[in-house]
Every structure is written in C-alpha cells, then in structure tokens.
Amino acid sequence: MASDGVITHRNVDVNGVRLHVAEAGPAGAPVVLLLHGFPELWYTWRHQMPALAAAGYRAVAPDMRGYGDSDAPSGGPDQYTALHVVGDLVALVDSLGQKQVFVVAHDWGALIAWSLCLFRPDRVKALVALSVAFNPRNPAVKPVDAFRALYGDDYYVCRFQEPGAVEVEFRRLGTELVLRKFFAYRTPGPLFIPKSGWGSPDEEVPLPSWITEEDIKYYTTEFDKSGFTGGLNYYRALNKTWDLTSPWTGAEIKVPTKFIVGDLDLTYNTADAQNFINKGGFKKFVPLLDDVVIMKDVAHFINEEKPKEISAHIISFINKFN
C-alpha cells in the first residue's frame, strides 16, 4: 500500500461476507475508516483518500455489504440490520490489526457509524459524521411508520420498503438516469418517488459541476453489475433494526464527534432536524459533540461537492486526537 495517495484494492473476509476495500496511505499509520451511503461506493471518498494519506493517515474505504464488489448476502433485508453491518466493520477493524480507528461517514454510512459508536465505542477514537445526525431511538414509533405518517407512501424511504418494487422502476429508467437523479437532487426538502413513475427514461438530467461523466460512468458500471437491492435493503431493515436495538433506548454516544451538513441537504430539511441539531437535542444525546458545521449552498453529497473543505475539516478534527 503506497503512502503517496495511490489507491489500492483488495478483498477482506469479515463476519461471513467478503468486502471489497480501497486503501491509501502508509501501512503503519493511524486508520481512518470511511463509510459511504446510498447510492454510493468506496468511490465517494476518492478526493478524501489521497488528502488523508498526505496528512499521514491510512484511509480505508470499503464497499459496504450489498454494494459494488462486496458480497450481497441473499437472506433478504434481515441480513442488513445495523447489527450485521456494524459486525462487518468490527471484523474489518480487527483484520487491520487495530484496536481503535477514526471513522468518517456519510448518509447511510453515518447511520451505521452512529450504531458502531453506540454498540462499540471502545473501537472508535473519534467520528466525523456527514449529512445524517444521530437519531435517538423513539420507543413509541418505528422509523418507517414515522416517515409514512409525516410524508405518505411516495416518500422515498417508504417507496423503498416493498422488496423488488422500486427496482422495477429503476430498471425502467435505467441505472445511469437513476444515479443522475439522485446526485443532482438539490431540493431542501423531502424526496418523493411517485408510484405513477419517477419521470421518463428519455429525461435529460445534467450533472452537477462536482461530478464528471467519468465518475457517473464508474458508478453506473458498478450498479449495473450489483443492482440496487443491496443498498435498498438497508432501508428495508430500518424497522428490524429498531426492533433489535431496544436495549439502547435513551443511550448516549460517548465518542468525540464533529458533524457537518449542507443547508440544502434533504436530511437537514426533514421534520424537526434543524431544531434538534441546533437547539440542544443533538448535544444532549452526543455529549462529546465538538462542533457542528452547516455549509451554505451545499446539498446532500457534501464530501463530493466540497471535497477540499471536507478533507480539511476531517484532518483538523482528527489531528486533535493523534
């Protein structure tokens, strides 16, 4: 593994699945585990990995289970609970010979990172969470049921629930168009995928300035191979995770944390998120929350849209613990 920012690839057997892992940076350096979201891959960290390597860290970015060149367990959504995915990460950290790692995580990766910090805080030195704040478990209502009550059946999380249904719609539109529609989404509010159809297959969706045709081609090739079901199964396991995590109701995250979100991010403009993040609720559940950064005129894919700024935020924060 080169220390000059060159990204290398290998497969690692963990927790009964084979994960494809991208790495950059010196072998003996402190590890930064980078966790992607939906519909992403290790590739979402292509800008941060060389920056972390140059700063003296070993960047490790897996394709999460169900994504890209990693295995997609075939047991349905129940194989994609937070406990399964955190199990993959603990085994991956073990395979790297590390007791503790830094974690940087975006979107679904952030949801999983919060669970990792909840279940195994002993394994995480510090966390930089992007886009998705900690969401304390509500013992009174399941998460999907809460979304459905708020936004109805066409809300994307609800549309994703029925196994196979939204995959038919994605096939109708084609992988590349689906990815373009996700990456180009800048509406500061909920995303709806109507049952009547999410637009036309011959729709033109221009790419935002921060993603190239070459980038979209890489994502498209990988999702053409794997399909979307692995990633969608994370959403389909939301209520199952809620069932299994009742022992952690009310538990706090005891890991030093920095949180960064764009003010146009759909997650920042969902329900009561802004009040929770800015008015003390977040800090109550994450007492070691060191800093909250709200980036102006930035949407959801923050680490790709503002790569230099995000890399600088990550490095300045984790340097405090090193």
Image: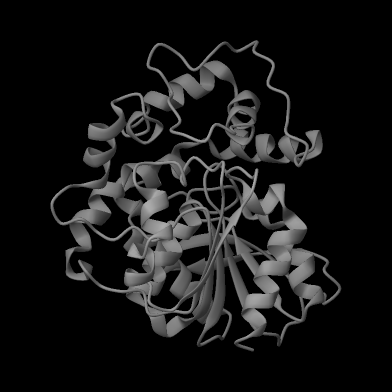
Which part of the image, by quadrant, shows the N terminus? bottom right
Which part of the image, by quadrant, shows the C terminus? bottom right
Front in this rendered view, residue 92 or 201: 201
Front in this rendered view, residue 105 or 267: 267
Above-or-below relation of 221 to 276: above
Total tally of numbered discs in the picture: 0
Front in this rendered view, residue 45 or 79: 45
x, y (%) of residue 266?
Answer: 49, 40
| Residue plotted at (37% across, 53% down) | 275
x, y (%) of residue 82?
Answer: 35, 59
Above-or-below relation of 114 to 211: below
Q: Does residue 133 show up?
A: yes
Above-or-below relation of 99 to 172: below
| Residue plotted at (45% across, 41% down) | 269
Q: Does residue 1 show up?
A: no
x, y (%) of residue 98?
Answer: 55, 85
x, y (%) of residue 274?
Answer: 42, 50
| Residue plotted at (64% across, 69% down) | 60
Query: In the image as oriented, which residue stretches furthest toward the left?
Result: 140
Query: In the image as oriented, which residue stretches furthest toward the right?
Result: 4
| Residue plotted at (56% across, 41% down) | 264
